[in-house]
Image (cartoon, grey):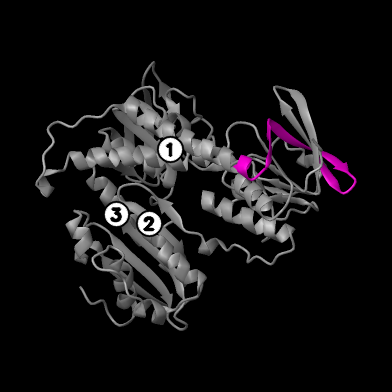
């Protein structure tokens, strides 16, 4: 087997493996190096297994609330071990699927850690090591870094795998925490808070910012907080978590907020305070690659300052989303091949939180649109006025849209409630197609569906909603 390839991909997550598949599809001879499992954190310890856990929790919640639907199931219980086993099984199945796709595409795979080792003519050299031994040295004129990221550690709040969990330990708990503290209220923290609360845990969320879900529109954030508090989740904002005092099977701390101090003793803590890029031990020191706060700096086509070297996904910076990584993979490969892909714009990337209720958004919030000097028209429509949502027993929610009052451009869309993560793509398509309110108002939405709230919110921004 030749050691020379057209492209080497380092990392087999949703950015890396998609880059390898697309490159092979377009006729390149591709190698991919992965040190653990194909699918990356997303498939193995993130997106897929967490959604599997959340589905189990949602079903358990529904079983406990059947009377409203004229149904009964006496004393429903859950088996945490089986819930976790199902989650791991789904991840394993999807991981094997990725490996099969790579094999089918005739991508050469290497098991080990990759490190840049200088150049050989016009080609980059990459050393692959396994258990400290070099098992292969391969070359290619183009190398894509897709090494992902890992959980950020805060001084004094470092995860220990037992009492203080990262997302990984939270997915495979050794026991069920009756009392739980979640530090951080981004998507990861909120989803775990939602999961454990639905199974009966007493959950407290501590957030250093003045509101939860800081990336979301403030109005949606406030509605989410009300919904979570209604479920019995205690939320502390502008919060500073003090020193941890660990016992054999519990941990205590004091949390300070502007409203005072809260002494708390819990079984476990989940620390979900962001991520840092995996930029170490890649051999970047001998290149022109720039690193900014643990993330590799790239241009709009994922190119670094080192010719022939590219970076995609989490290692290349925010937003840290699997679908962003996959789309960057396609853009990067097509640019390498001389095609003319459109750059990826952050405001066109949807964000989703799969809690109960779900949250989804794309584009600018009302607050940011106004701060950017836009004159806006805003439309809102509550799920309470939507027949399908009421029929489903899911009347709590809202769809909100923000338009440029002058041009009719859809600046942003923000949703909270049942199934909104499945619907936000409608607004993503609208933005990608540069549709204005005129086209959206004339679009026929099927009835009865929750998606009708998307149409009504557009009407509310301009001529007035029909059903409220």
How far is disc 2 from disc 3 in space, using C-alphas? 9 Å
Q: Which residue is mark 3?
A: 418
The answer to which of marks 1 and 3 sits earlier in the sequence is 1
Say if the magenta span includes residue 106.
Answer: yes
Quadrant where the C terminus is found in the figure: bottom left
Mark 1 / mark 2, whichever is N-terminal: 1
The percent coordinates of residue 132 (x first, y second) are 73, 22
Mainly helix, strand or loop, the magenta region? strand
Of residues 233 and 304, the one drawn nearer to the viewer in this rendering: 304
For label 2, the residue is 422
Looking at this view, name the residue that lies furthest to the top.
Answer: 248
- Residue 23 x, y percent position in the rendering: 68, 52
Circle 1 — which element? helix
Q: Which residues are magenta?
A: 102-125
Q: CA distance from mark 1 to mark 3?
A: 20 Å
Q: Is residue 270 above or below residue 434?
A: above
Check disc 1 and report the residue beneath it.
Answer: 49
């Amino acid at each position: 087997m030749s050691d020379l390839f057209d492209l080497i991909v380092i990392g087999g997550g949703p950015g890396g493996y998609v880059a390898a598949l697309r490159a092979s599809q377009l006729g390149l001879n591709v190698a991919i190096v992965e040190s653990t499992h194909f699918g990356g954190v997303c498939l193995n310890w993130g997106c897929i297994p967490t959604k599997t856990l959340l589905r189990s929790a949602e079903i358990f919640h529904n079983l406990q609330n059947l009377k409203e639907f004229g149904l009964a199931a006496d004393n429903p219980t859950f088996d945490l071990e089986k819930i976790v086993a199902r989650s791991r099984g789904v991840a394993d199945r999807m991981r094997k699927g990725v490996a099969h796709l790579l094999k089918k595409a005739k991508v050469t795979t290497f098991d080990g850690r990759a490190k840049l080792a200088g150049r050989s003519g016009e080609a980059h050299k990459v050393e692959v090591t396994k258990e400290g031994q070099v098992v292969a040295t391969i070359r290619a004129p183009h190398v894509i870094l897709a090494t992902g990221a890992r959980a950020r550690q805060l001084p004094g709040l470092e995860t220990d795998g037992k009492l203080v969990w990262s997302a990984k330990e939270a997915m495979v708990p050794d026991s069920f925490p009756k009392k739980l503290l979640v530090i951080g209220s981004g998507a990861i923290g909120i989803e775990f808070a939602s999961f454990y609360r639905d199974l009966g845990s007493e959950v407290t969320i501590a957030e250093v910012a003045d509101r939860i879900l800081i990336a979301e529109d403030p109005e949606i954030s406030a509605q989410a907080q009300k919904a979570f508090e209604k479920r019995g989740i205690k939320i502390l904002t502008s919060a500073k978590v003090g020193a941890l005092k660990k016992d054999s099977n519990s941990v205590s701390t004091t949390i300070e907020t502007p409203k005072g101090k809260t002494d708390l003793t819990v079984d476990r803590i989940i620390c979900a305070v962001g991520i840092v890029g995996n930029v170490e031990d890649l051999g970047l020191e001998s290149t022109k690659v720039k690193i900014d706060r643990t993330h590799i700096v790239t241009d709009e086509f994922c190119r670094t300052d080192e010719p022939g070297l590219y970076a995609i996904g989490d290692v290349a910076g925010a937003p840290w989303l699997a679908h962003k990584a996959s789309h960057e993979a396609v853009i990067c490969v097509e640019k390498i091949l001389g095609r003319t892909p459109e750059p990826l714009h952050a405001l066109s990337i949807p964000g989703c939180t799969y809690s109960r209720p779900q949250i989804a958004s794309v584009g600018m919030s009302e607050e940011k649109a106004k701060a950017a000097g836009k004159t806006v028209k805003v439309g809102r429509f509550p799920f309470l006025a939507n027949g399908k949502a009421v029929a489903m027993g899911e009347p709590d929610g809202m769809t909100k849209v923000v338009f440029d009052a002058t041009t009719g451009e859809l600046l942003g869309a923000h949703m909270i409630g049942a199934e909104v993560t499945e619907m936000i793509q409608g607004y993503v398509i609208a933005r990608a197609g540069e549709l204005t309110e005129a086209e959206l108002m004339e679009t026929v939405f099927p009835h009865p569906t929750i998606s009708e709230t998307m149409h009504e919110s557009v009407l509310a921004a301009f001529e007035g909603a029909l059903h409220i």
